Amino acid sequence: MKAVEIRNFSIEELRKKEKELRKELFNLRFQIAKGELQNVKRVKAVKKEIARILTIITEKERGIRS
């Protein structure tokens, strides 16, 4: 998901999405430990998406961008 699309969400929706992504990241790490994960690039993508969401939440809370 691109930053422009994420900015259209409310803070509550962003926090919900962040929580879902953190669960996914946990599951991906678990799969890596068990040797089941086929697409290891997904871990990096999920981390970047979490960081993007946290950045936009911070921007919205501080009123930097609308």
Image (cartoon, rainbow, N blue to C red):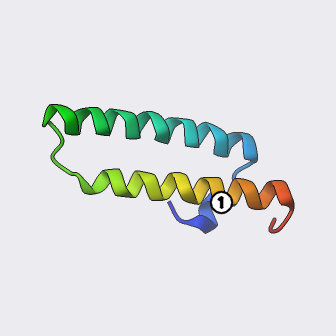
Residue 10 location (% of width, % of height): 74, 48
> Which residue bears the numbered disc 1?
55
Residue 18 location (% of width, % of height): 57, 42
Q: Is residue 23 visible?
A: yes
Which residue type carries mark 1?
A: Thr
Quick one: 66 or 30, which is closer to the camera?
30
Q: Is residue 60 left or right of residue 14?
A: right
- Quadrant containing the C terminus is bottom right
Where disc 1 sits, the SS reads helix
Picture quadrant of residue 28:
top left
Q: Is residue 8 visible?
A: no
Residue 11 location (% of width, % of height): 74, 46
Give the number of marks: 1
Quick one: 66 or 46, which is closer to the camera?
46
- Considering only vertical position in the picture, is 11 above or below 30? below
Q: Is residue 8 left or right of residue 19?
A: right
Residue found at x 27% / y 57%: 41
Picture quadrant of residue 4:
bottom right
